[in-house]
């Protein structure tokens, strides 16, 4: 699933809650608040034992910002 961290399935929460909780028709407006995020599920299955290992990895996408220059150092 991808989308802003403050949204629900990429939309404003109020509209999704109205649709889900009360079955009201409500428009799905894109959410514009919060950092972008990518969530995924990685399954690793051992073919010999059929055991499954599950890992949840969360990646936060943020725009690249230029780093400020380091402060000047006093002379030695």
Image (cartoon, grey):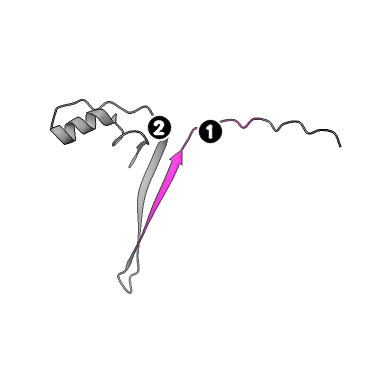
Q: Which mark is residue 34?
A: 2
User: Is residue 9 on the magenta stretch?
Assistant: no
Judge depth for marks 2 and 1 and give the one in front: 2
Q: Secondary structure at mark 2?
A: loop
* Sequence-earlier tag: 2 or 1: 2
Please give left or right for residue 24 compared with residue 51 in the image.
left
Determine which quarter of the picture holds residue 29: top left
Quadrant containing the N terminus in the rendered view: top left
> Which residues are the magenta region?
53-68
Q: Is residue 34 above or below residue 41?
A: above
Whole-percent x, y for residue 69 in the image: 68, 31
User: Is residue 61 on the magenta stretch?
Assistant: yes
Residue lying at the far left of the rendered structure? 23
Disc 2 residue crowd, few under 14, some 14–19, many 20+, Cα 10 Å: few
- For label 1, the residue is 64
Q: Is residue 48 above or below residue 43?
A: below
The residue positioned 35% from the left and 69% from the top of the image is 46
Q: Which mark is residue 5?
A: none
Gap in angstroms between the C-alphas marked 2 and 1? 15 Å
């Amino acid at each position: 699933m991808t989308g802003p961290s403050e949204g629900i399935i990429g939309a404003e929460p109020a509209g999704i809650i109205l649709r889900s909780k009360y079955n009201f028709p409500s428009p799905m407006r894109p959410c514009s608040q919060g950092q972008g995020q990518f969530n995924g599920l990685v399954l690793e299955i051992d073919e010999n034992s059929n055991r499954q290992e599950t890992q949840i990895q969360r990646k936060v996408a943020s725009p690249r910002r230029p780093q400020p220059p380091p402060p000047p150092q006093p002379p030695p």
